[in-house]
Amino acid sequence: MIPVTLIMAITADGKIGKSSDHFANWTSPEDKKIFIEISKEFGLIMMGKKTFQTFPTPLKNRLNVVFSENPGEKHEDVLWVNGEPEETLEKLEKLGHKKALLGGGTSLNTLFLKKKLINEIILTVEPKLFGSGLSLFNDDFDINLELLELKKINQNSYSVKYKVVY
């Protein structure tokens, strides 16, 4: 099965958004640059329908893989999928992809982690506090991470990359 990397921006208190329709306009320009570079390198980004709907249009120059029981409009850059994540990863592998990038939201992140399908996690930690809101995951886990990379991306933000150790 192709490896999966989760990429998310989080606040210092671990939130990915205030609500499911909160557009990620609170992140730094440096975070947006990292997201664009990595998602283009992967050639695809997997996400739930609610996350997909926070974007004004499908992300260009990469395949938008959207998990939903009710597909939306047909678009050449969008692959609507439903069912088990393993089936989608097999389909992506058959399409020639060697790796997959997961971009949320909370429920999809949780599903992939429960099934032990996330190999790496790339987080941009932004200098914000939301208090309440959406967490990176919404279940109880006790999973270890191994630090692979830590870098300061601007005066107040940093990017961290972990290997997931199951």
Image (spheres, rainbow, N blue to C red):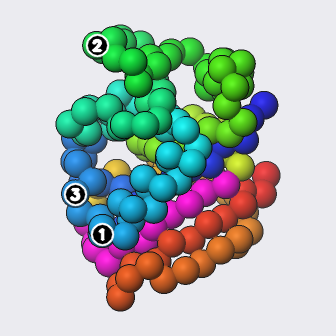
* Amino acid marked by disc 3: Asn
The kind of residue on which mark 1 rests is Ser
Above or below, 91 against 113 in this view is above
Q: Is residue 64 left or right of residue 89?
A: left
Q: Mark 2 or mark 1, which is nearer the start of the sequence?
A: 1
Pointers 1 and 3 in contact (C-beta within 8 Å): no
Is residue 27 something that shows in the picture?
yes
Q: Kindly tell me whether residue 131 is visible in this rendering.
A: no
Q: How many marks?
A: 3
Comparing 39 with 3, the one in front is 39
State the residue position of label 1: 28
Looking at the picture, which amino acid does disc 2 mark? Glu
Bounds of the magenta segment: 120-130
**x, y percent for residue 156:** 35, 85
- As drawn, the label of residue 25 is 3
CA gap, disc 1 and disc 2: 30 Å
Q: Nearer the viewer, residue 87 or 61?
A: 61
Q: x, y (%) of residue 49? A: 35, 27
Lower position in the chain sequence, tag 3 or tag 2: 3
Locate residue 143 relative to residue 60 in the image: left or right.
right
Q: Residue furthest front?
A: 61
Residue 73: numbered disc: 2
Per the picture, the main secondary structure of the magenta-coloured stretch is strand
Decide: is 71 above or below 64: above
Q: Position of residue 136 (x, y in %)?
A: 46, 53
Q: Residue at x 38, y 82 (%)?
A: 154
Q: Is residue 123 rendered magenta in the image?
A: yes
Q: Residue at x 71, y 71 (%)?
A: 148
> Alpha-carbon distance for marks 3 and 2?
24 Å
Q: Residue at x 65, y 74 (%)?
A: 149
